[in-house]
Image (cartoon, coloured by chain):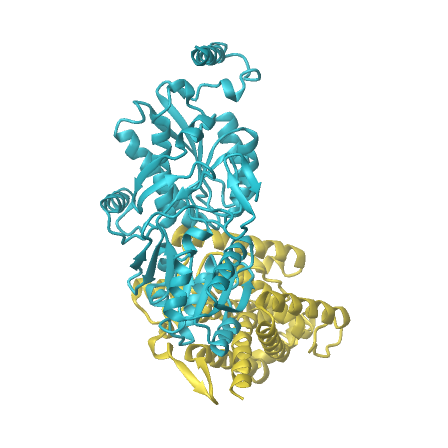
Chain colours: A cyan, B yellow
């Protein structure tokens, strides 16, 4: 009784807002706004189409649009079409925040899918927390975040490293060289890596950070030569990763005895550096383009048919794709009047979806995803060979490097 | 022993890239006094030239070097005629104009070639490594070092031992008086600007197999180039050689004992201190004001 009365009130308020068109929306708060109107559900798509990270974010935009088109072509969500509002934040965190505000406040989107870098996610976070809206973030990241307004569908450190680090220690040895770009992501990944290495009795012989955009690695390579590490754990990103691989190869070092192990080198980065420079090195990720599953075959074929035969899919475009399907499943469970950012968030908790990487699930506690990590070795043709995959899906733990903290549904808890 | 050799080689490799990138700027700045902020974009165009010739025509890097030099030099010529020559007496305006040119070139490349990172294949004959006194170094890096020194010698010979060089030196000392003696300083400026642009293009092509090729890549090189030229002394070619050698070796050693982030900061700090006490640079030639 209570529930239906509330529903009635909501509908009434929404109808009120609708009929008094001349009025500004001052008195119609977000909570009483009907998000599903006229058989349409508006969502925001916020990936940079221009600027420095446009190359990678464009592929995320494409995977997102493709998933929306798929759902609409199959009849939409309970007959309602998803209508994407696409904005270009131009690789600039301040513009990200501004566009996010527009999507949430003036376009009244029920959710926004977007962003690639941690800097841009941090920039939009206050918008979604203040407006009680919902943001979907597809990128692997450093963890250490516990927002109730973000669904994280990319991997956190424990998911990429738990299998990877012991496997590398066993196969190559215990002397590790950690090299990364100088910002938050590599430092947090290395924090967790050092913790794992300590447990395995392995030794970190150097931990070094180069400036973002750095492209001269001759000193670093000189150190590789003299220190002779068994594994080079690389969290170098952007155009630096291309320079590092090409100079490593020019120096005549051998991936068979001193491989680089990366958490960010996907098919996309390999295409930028050339397969010859990447061949022999390792990456850990939940998804590789060559992964053999019926869902992935369908995904890759559809992607190429929609965007061009020379395009590659990679682990961030895959999560951009499956998070739309998770969104659709969650919305489908709700009555039209209950469709709203927080309703969707509660409905998506524990939701499962058969993604190209395998079955994934949203963890109700921390809103990150259970994923299926794999270890791939790059080949000269630019694709990976999958050497090992985790036996089961892996629980996300955004605070894996900080055992005294835990992200729960009530927020961050000290243990 | 092999450690010291490999450290020296690393420094030389850093120096050779600095020298290549700075030479074009030193020539242009030294003779015409134009602060060319589009210099990094000439470097970038050279790298894109190498990429284009390799992917479209299947040309190897070494045979592409001369066409790339000529193409970028031709572009430099056009830019001098259309923009720079109107601004010789207005140094502040040239800074703004060349900066604007740089932005335009970047965006044109982004719109035509796309924003993706590109790479250039190393010549197969130079893709191995070489053993020198127990230390190994990339054959390609040694090749770049050789070309950098050869380019320096060529410019030195032109500057010192040809009549064109004599005219350039006269213009550098006092362009007004030089004109009175019948030297066509407008033409000399044009040739110099085109030549400097061509050398920058050559530098871009040579470094492209070691770095990633992207529309924004020039920005870092223009800073490096100015650092070298300012430290060496604006009108001194020998100063450019010495300061690129010095900066390369110092940052090599600092990066080895700490890391690249600290090396970069310390080198910049050292330059600030040196410029404070020797504003004319380390090797300023004695010219009458």
Rendering quarter of residue A362: top left
Inspect this view and state whether residue B107 appears: yes
Side of B289 relative to A317 (left or right): right
Query: Residue drawn 71% across and 67% down?
Result: B272
Q: Nearer the viewer, residue B35 or A168?
A: A168
Using the image, determine if residue A19 lies above or below residue A114: above
Expressed as whole percent of the image width and height from the top left, the position of residue A281 reads 37, 65
Expressed as whole percent of the image width and height from the top left, the position of residue A19 reads 47, 9
Q: Nearer the viewer, residue A140 or A14?
A: A140
Query: Residue drawn 37% across and 44% down?
Result: A319
Which quadrant does the C terminus of chain A fall into?
Answer: top right
Expressed as whole percent of the image width and height from the top left, the position of residue A117 reads 49, 48
Side of A64 relative to A123 (left or right): left
Which quadrant does the N terminus of chain A fall into?
Answer: top left
Using the image, determine if residue B165 lies above or below residue A285: below
Inspect this view and state whether residue B46 appears: no
Expressed as whole percent of the image width and height from the top left, the position of residue A374 reads 34, 55
Using the image, determine if residue A215 lies above or below residue A252: above
Rendering quarter of residue A278: bottom left
Q: Nearer the viewer, residue A275 or B211?
A: A275
């Amino acid at each position: 009784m209570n529930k239906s009365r509330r529903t009635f009130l909501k509908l009434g308020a929404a109808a009120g807002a609708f009929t008094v068109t001349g009025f500004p929306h001052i008195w119609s708060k977000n909570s009483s706004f009907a998000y599903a109107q006229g058989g349409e559900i508006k969502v925001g798509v916020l990936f940079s189409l221009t600027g420095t990270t446009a190359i990678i974010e464009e592929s995320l935009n494409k995977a997102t649009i493709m998933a929306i088109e798929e759902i609409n072509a199959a009849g939409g969500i309970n007959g309602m079409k998803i209508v994407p509002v696409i904005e270009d934040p131009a690789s600039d965190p301040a513009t990200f925040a501004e566009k996010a505000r527009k999507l949430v406040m003036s376009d009244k989107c029920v959710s926004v899918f977007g962003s690639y870098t941690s800097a841009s996610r941090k920039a939009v976070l206050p918008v979604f927390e203040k407006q009680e809206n919902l943001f979907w973030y597809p990128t692997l990241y450093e963890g250490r975040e516990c927002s109730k307004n973000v669904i994280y569908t990319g991997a956190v450190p424990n998911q990429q490293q738990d299998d990877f680090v012991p496997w590398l220690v066993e196969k190559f040895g215990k002397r590790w060289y950690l090299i990364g770009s100088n910002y938050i992501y590599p430092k947090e990944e290395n924090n967790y890596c050092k913790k794992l290495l300590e447990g395995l009795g392995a030794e970190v012989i150097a931990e070094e950070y180069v400036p973002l955009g750095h492209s001269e690695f001759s000193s670093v390579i000189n150190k590789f030569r003299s220190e002779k590490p068994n594994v080079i754990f690389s969290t170098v990103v952007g155009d630096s990763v291309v320079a590092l691989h090409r100079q490593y190869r020019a120096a005549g070092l051998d991936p068979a005895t001193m491989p680089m192990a990366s958490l960010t080198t996907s098919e996309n980065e390999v295409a930028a550096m050339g397969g010859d420079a990447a061949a022999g090195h390792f990456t850990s990720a939940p998804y590789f383009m060559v992964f053999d599953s019926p869902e992935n075959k369908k995904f890759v074929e559809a992607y190429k048919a929609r965007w061009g035969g020379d395009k590659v899919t990679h682990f961030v475009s895959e999560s951009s794709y499956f998070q739309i399907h998770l969104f659709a499943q969650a919305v489908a469970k709700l009555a039209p009047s209950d469709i709203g950012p927080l309703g969707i968030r509660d409905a998506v908790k524990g939701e499962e979806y058969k993604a190209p990487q395998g079955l994934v699930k949203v963890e109700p506690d921390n809103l990150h995803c259970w994923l299926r990590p794999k270890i791939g070795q790059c080949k000269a043709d630019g694709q990976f060979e999958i050497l090992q995959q985790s036996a089961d899906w892996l629980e996300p733990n955004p605070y894996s490097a900080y055992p005294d903290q835990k992200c729960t549904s009530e927020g961050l808890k000290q243990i | 022993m092999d450690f010291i050799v490999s450290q020296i080689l690393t420094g030389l490799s850093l120096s050779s890239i600095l020298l290549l990138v700075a030479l074009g700027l030193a020539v242009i700045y030294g003779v015409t006094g134009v602060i060319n902020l589009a210099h990094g974009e000439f470097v970038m165009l050279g790298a894109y030239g190498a990429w284009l010739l390799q992917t479209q025509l299947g040309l190897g890097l070494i045979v592409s070097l001369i066409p790339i030099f000529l193409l970028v030099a031709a572009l430099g010529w056009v830019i001098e005629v259309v923009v720079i020559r109107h601004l010789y007496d207005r140094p502040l305006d040239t800074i703004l104009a060349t900066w604007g040119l740089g932005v335009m070139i970047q965006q044109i490349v982004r719109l035509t070639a796309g924003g993706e990172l590109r790479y250039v294949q190393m010549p197969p004959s130079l893709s191995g490594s070489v053993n020198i006194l127990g230390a190994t170094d990339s054959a390609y890096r040694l090749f770049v070092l050789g070309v950098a020194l050869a380019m320096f010698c060529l410019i030195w010979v032109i500057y010192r031992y040809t009549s064109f060089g004599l005219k350039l030196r006269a213009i550098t000392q006092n362009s007004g008086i030089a004109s009175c003696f019948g030297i066509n300083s407008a033409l000399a400026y044009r040739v110099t600007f085109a030549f400097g642009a061509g050398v920058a293009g050559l530098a871009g092509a040579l470094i492209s197999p070691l770095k990633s090729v992207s529309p924004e890549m020039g920005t870092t090189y223009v800073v490096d180039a100015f650092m070298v030229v300012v430290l060496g002394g604006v009108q001194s070619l020998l100063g450019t050689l010495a300061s690129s050698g010095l900066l390369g070796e110092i940052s090599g050693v600092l990066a080895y004992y700490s890391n690249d982030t600290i090396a970069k900061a310390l080198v910049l700090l050292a330059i600030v201190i040196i410029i404070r006490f020797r504003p004319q640079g380390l090797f300023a030639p004695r010219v009458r004001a």
